[in-house]
Amino acid sequence: MTDSSLPISRSRRVRYRTLVFGAVRWAVVGAVVGAVVSAGLLAFWPPKPATDTSFALGALVLGFGVTAWSTAVGLGRTIEGLQARLDVSSNWTEASAREAFFVLSWTGTGWAFAAALLSVAFGV
């Protein structure tokens, strides 16, 4: 018997489906943002600098999202414990931070991808 033959629980399938749906949804939102930013920059610059700038902004959002997400995963429980120990009332939680940076990461991915596709479409 191998690990791949083990059945996946229903709750795990629902969780994966939710994560995939969320990733696709935010990547599409990011793609729209990337296309709008690229089109907006075309009013001021030629196609190559416009799409390059839009790609760089999308990559910046992606990089920040991934870095902050990994920090939330690595230090989240420590920060929550420190807040409890210091009796600091804050609405910050590890789960909410992970969700926020998940959104930023996938939005940046869609943004950068759309800018790259527009660059190819413009032939630059």
Image: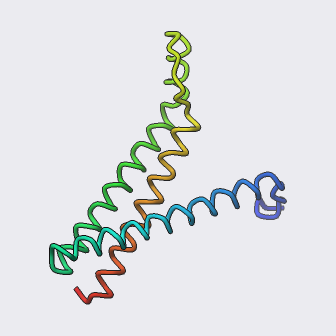
Quadrant position of residue 47: bottom left
Query: Which residue occupies 41% across, 49% down?
Result: 65
Q: Position of residue 2 (x, y in %)?
A: 79, 61
Above or below, 80 against 2 in this view is above
Query: Which residue occupies 51% across, 51% down?
Result: 102
Above or below, 30 against 123 in this view is above
**Front residue of 12 and 42:** 42
Quadrant position of residue 84: top right
Above or below, 110 against 88 in this view is below
From the viewer's perspective, tell me whether residue 74 is left or right of residue 56. right
Structure colour scheme: rainbow
Quadrant position of residue 77: top right
Quarter that holds the N terminus: bottom right
Q: Position of residue 109 (x, y in %)?
A: 42, 64
**How many marks are shown on the rendered structure?**
0
Q: Position of residue 124 (x, y in %)?
A: 22, 85
**Front residue of 112 and 45:** 45
Query: Which residue occupies 29% across, 75% down?
Result: 39
Residue sticking out furthest to the top: 86
**Front residue of 37 and 95:** 37
Q: Position of residue 90 (x, y in %)?
A: 51, 22
From the viewer's perspective, tell me whether residue 47 is left or right of residue 82. left
**Front residue of 58 and 42:** 42
From the viewer's perspective, tell me whether residue 41 is left or right of residue 23. left
Query: Which residue occupies 48% across, 59% down?
Result: 106
